[in-house]
């Protein structure tokens, strides 16, 4: 049994989809996890000089002011 319902326009073209909240939440969680994996891989490729944690934290705090 399919869990999605399609919303169609007057010509019968699919323009939106309705899914259960649980499916939506899983899609969002999976998407965020994939973003984290991409950022991790990008950081692993970084060839620059690392900065100390305290310095990074201060830079983040200063950027929020």
Image (cartoon, helix red, strand yellow):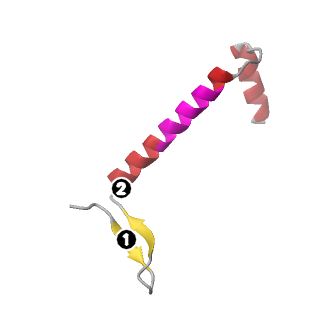
7 to 35, vertically: above or below:
below
Residue at label 1? 6
Residue drawn 66% across and 22% down?
45
Residue drawn 78% across and 36% down?
65
To which quarter of the image does residue 35 belong?
A: top right
Q: Main secondary structure of the magenta part?
A: helix
Badge 1 local density, few (<14 within 10 Å), some, or many (20+)? few
To which quarter of the image does residue 20 belong?
A: bottom left
Front-most of residues 3 and 62: 3
Residue found at the far bottom of this picture? 10
Q: Is residue 64 magenta?
A: no
Q: Which mark is residue 24?
A: none
Residue at label 2? 21
3 to 60, vertically: above or below:
below
Q: Quadrant of the N terminus?
A: bottom left
Q: Is residue 9 left or right of residue 51?
A: left
Residue found at the far left of this picture? 1
Residues drawn in magenta = 31-42
28 to 41, vertically: above or below:
below
């Amino acid at each position: 049994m399919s869990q999605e319902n399609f919303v169609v326009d007057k010509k019968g073209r699919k323009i939106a989809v309705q899914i259960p909240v649980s499916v939506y939440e899983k899609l969002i969680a999976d998407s965020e996890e994939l973003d984290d994996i991409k950022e991790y891989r990008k950081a692993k490729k970084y060839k620059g000089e690392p900065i100390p944690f305290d310095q990074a934290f201060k830079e983040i705090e200063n950027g929020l002011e």
